[in-house]
Image (cartoon, coloured by chain):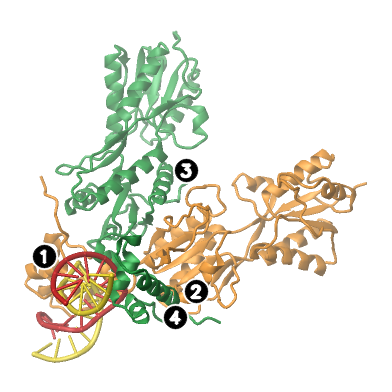
Chain colours: A green, B orange, C red, D yellow
DNA sequence: TTGAAAGCGCTACCAG
DNA sequence: CTGGTAGCGCTTTCAA
């Protein structure tokens, strides 16, 4: 029976066995193929010794020297790792993993950074674990902007999925073209004859919400439509339903199409309309901006974010950043599309 | 606007700024809390400098010294990473990730090792990437036993999910108690009055299959039942259906219950029985040993593997191995259960 | 209590 | 073409 080795062999051991210097070993091991001008004979002797000893390079030592790991990090600001298959983020990860594999990188899931408060910080006891990887992809709704600023300040290569503005820093982001596609949605609605629209939102604040809102407002104006959105939120206090007043106004008014920020909101809308004997899409058309589950695909007219593709692009952008010492790392905007569901129909006069 | 730093600060920089020696810095930074006997004053000065410079320790250097990374690897022998949500392996990963996070470890997904032939090897050009992590969890049906042997031989800490026998090595495995639960299944069938059973399998060979098969055979014998399994495979040449001869024999014979190795096999069985006007479970009861999707839960009587729990246990076992220098790392057997579906009923005489 | 110094295993530079 | 050598940034004796 084989005996387990007590200590991993080092280049020095190989060198001794092969009767060459350690640096010769290094050159044979590390240099790309034939580029190292080493006589075939020496080369063979070294390789032979390597095999005999079962030598494998020590990655830590290597990266200490070369400052490269072939390791890319993934950090989510919420504790939603593979966890939630239904998660908004899952598909991004698929793309990330796929592309990383294609490019020969391994992935580090930074999961250790979880804190008790349900958020994840990059810095823990002042230690930035991310440094372990050559660069990282960050994502999550609860992005900590201080972390982002600090990371950027350190010159650590990273990209963020989703737009994040941090004063004094230029965060390279991979961002869905919310502005554009929301405009497309409004236009599509206009083509269906809708002239009076309203925008149903939860809490505004994040950049993504802003982009969508701007796209909506902009298109409505450009197309000469009428926006009947109310100023405040339509959500009830407990956030489980929509305000009766809001729904009543919708039921009474001229609005024939609603652009809903999220699926839950749209769901509440449906319930509210139902109670008022209004049907979707016959009486009111609905488009959802953030639908997640696969079963949502058939149901709602919705904004489709090419998540997997975005994950892939994040890796591409990151690798570029990692490879290019001086690169600035511009943000990239990714086009989105509209998926057809069963919630948009031609506008019809209501009484 | 903040300027990005060109070079990350090192302990030497901190030391200079604080007016102390580098080793003092190291002691303050690395030593667990108060254990380093350092005057409060000095300590504060150092911490102050750390903050000012935004110093963060370099993980590679650290692990080169300490030979510890707080990094655990995951290596799948097939290219099925988060990829397949429906994958048999997905749930294991959930548990692995969860437990690793709890223990403060980060995870490395070894995705870079993919080869063109669709298999993943641990060693690529003789380099063992796994060394990057303190230890690794391996899984996958296509386990390469040479890799396993070599890894074990090197003394690299790892555990394998699923039993794997390698001559000359004692691979620490986390294994579902297939033997036991298959016995339970047979017993359950017996309680329902079934006396004549058959075992429907694909290609035998892997350890898991053996265990299940043994559990079945053993229980059948113990309970005095009759096993009508045929010697060869019941699969047709193209593997998309069952052999007509096999099905005819089943339809004719006294067998009232089938233990099917996998869901696809059970599916084919259903089709074949249907064509012969036999109903499940009225005429024939069916239990599936390897059902994956969540929708399978309601449908089949099946063997349930607590995958997530196994993932967690794998991490526990691995960490133990990593922590204990001399540990042997025994295998652990995890109990499985039977989930009730709609495919088992009391045995009924057929004509 | 603190600092000097010796490496961890590797790569890369510079002589020969 | 090859070997010696100087570190990468950190931890850890060992003396002072």
- Looking at the rendered image, the disc whose residue lies closer to the viewer, 3 or 2, is 2
- The part of the image, by quadrant, that contains residue B319 is bottom left
Q: Earlier in the sequence, mark 3 or mark 4?
A: 4
Q: Which disc number belongs to residue A86?
A: 3
Q: Residues within 10 Å of mark 1 (few under 14, many from 20)?
A: many
Q: Chain of mark 3?
A: A
Q: Which disc number belongs to residue A223?
A: none
Spatial separation of the CA atoms under disc 4 and disc 2? 9 Å
Q: Residues within 10 Å of mark 3 (few under 14, many from 20)?
A: few
Q: Earlier in the sequence, mark 1 or mark 2?
A: 1
The answer to which of B120 and D5 lies nearer the viewer is D5
Spatial separation of the CA atoms under disc 3 and disc 1? 45 Å
The answer to which of B204 and A287 lies nearer the viewer is B204
Where disc 2 sits, the SS reads helix
Q: Are marks 4 and 1 on the same chain?
A: no
Q: Is residue B205 above or below residue A148?
A: below
| CB atoms of marks 4 and 1 within 8 Å | no
Residue holding disc 4 = A5
Q: Are marks 3 and 4 on the same chain?
A: yes
Residue holding disc 2 = B152
Q: Chain of mark 1?
A: B
Please tell me which residue is depicted at 78% across the width and 57% down the height of the picture: B232
Residue holding disc 1 = B49
- The part of the image, by quadrant, that contains residue A117 is bottom left
Where disc 3 sits, the SS reads loop
């Amino acid at each position: 029976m084989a005996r387990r080795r007590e200590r991993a062999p080092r280049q020095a051991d190989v060198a001794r066995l092969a009767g060459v210097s350690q640096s010769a070993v290094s050159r044979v091991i590390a240099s790309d193929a034939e580029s190292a001008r080493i006589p075939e004979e020496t080369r063979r002797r070294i390789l032979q010794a390597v095999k005999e000893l079962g030598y494998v390079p020590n990655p830590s030592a290597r990266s200490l020297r070369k400052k490269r790991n072939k390791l890319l990090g993934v950090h989510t600001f919420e504790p939603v790792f593979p966890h939630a298959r239904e998660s908004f983020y899952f598909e991004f990860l698929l793309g990330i993993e796929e592309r990383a594999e294609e490019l020969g990188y391994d992935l580090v899931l930074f999961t250790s950074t979880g804190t008790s408060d349900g958020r994840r910080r990059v810095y823990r006891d002042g230690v930035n674990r991310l440094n372990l990887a050559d660069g990282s992809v960050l994502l999550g709704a609860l992005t900590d902007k201080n972390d982002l600023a600090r990371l950027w300040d350190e010159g650590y290569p990273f990209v963020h999925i989703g737009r994040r503005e941090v004063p004094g820093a230029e965060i390279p982001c991979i961002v869905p073209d919310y502005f554009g596609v929301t405009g497309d949605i409004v236009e599509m609605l206009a083509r269906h004859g809708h002239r009076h629209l309203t925008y149903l939102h939860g809490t505004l604040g994040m950049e993504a919400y802003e982009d969508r809102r701007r796209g909506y407002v902009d298109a409505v104006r450009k197309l000469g439509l009428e926006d009947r959105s109310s100023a405040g939120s339509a959500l009830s206090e407990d956030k489980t339903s929509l305000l009766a007043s809001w729904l009543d106004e919708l039921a009474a008014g001229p609005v024939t199409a609603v652009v809903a920020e999220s699926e839950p909101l749209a769901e509440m809308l449906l319930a509210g309309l139902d109670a008022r004997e209004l049907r979707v899409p016959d009486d009111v058309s609905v488009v959802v901006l953030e639908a997640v589950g696969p079963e949502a695909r058939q149901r709602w007219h919705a904004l489709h974010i090419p998540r997997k593709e975005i994950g892939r692009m994040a890796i591409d952008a990151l690798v570029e950043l990692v490879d290019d010492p001086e690169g600035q790392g511009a943000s990239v905007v990714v086009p989105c599309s509209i998926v057809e569901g069963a919630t948009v129909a031609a506008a019809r006069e209501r009484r």
